[in-house]
Amino acid sequence: MESRATQSVRVPVRNLRQVDPSVDVDDLQAALGWEFLRTSLGGEDEGMEAARRQRGFTKVRPDNGYYPGIEQLREDLQSHRWIFGKTPRFKVRRSFALPEDMVPAPAAAEAPGGAHGTAVPPAPPEIRIELDVHLGVIQVCGRGSTS
């Protein structure tokens, strides 16, 4: 594969309820909210006093009534252009040996002679595929074969 993109790192993802079935989403959101409020901009824990100075937090309803334009933003972030269109251009090149049932049997005259007049089987033919992908769409699909 040929690409100028930064290599991504796969990170395992698990549902917290698989780890602990007693996890309550509302309690978890509240705990995370309070931890956020007690943390300074520099990342230092300033304790619950800092959180109290913030006067707590309020859950918001992310809809157009409260935040005009948020529905369009959601649609944009779920679009093919955003998900795949931000993918850097890359190329993939692969070669595959053809399965035996797809390889035609060589004619007797085509088989090269080996030691003591025995035929040496030719190397199995391969097919080469190259894909050039830009904005998440295959731009060029090239193929070739060897025999």
Image (tube, helix red, strand yellow):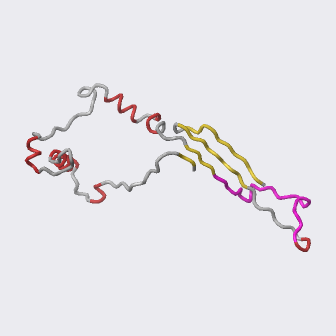
Viewer-proximal residue among 38 and 28: 38
Give the quarter of the image for residue 73.
Answer: top left
Viewer-proximal residue among 114 and 71: 114
**Would you say residue 102 sits in the magenta stretch?**
yes
Q: Where residue 75 appears, x then y in whole percent?
A: 38, 31
Whether residue 121 is visible, yes or no, is: yes
Q: How many marks?
A: 0
Give the quarter of the image for residue 116.
Answer: bottom right
Q: Where residue 137 appears, x then y in whole percent?
A: 55, 37
- From the image, which quarter does the C terminus lie in? bottom right
Q: Is residue 91 left or right of residue 39?
A: right
Q: Where residue 35 appears, x then y in whole percent?
A: 17, 49
Magenta segment, prevailing SS (helix, strand or loop):
loop
Q: Residue at x 70, y 57 (%)?
A: 97
The residues colored magenta run: 94-114
Q: Is residue 22 left or right of residue 120?
A: left
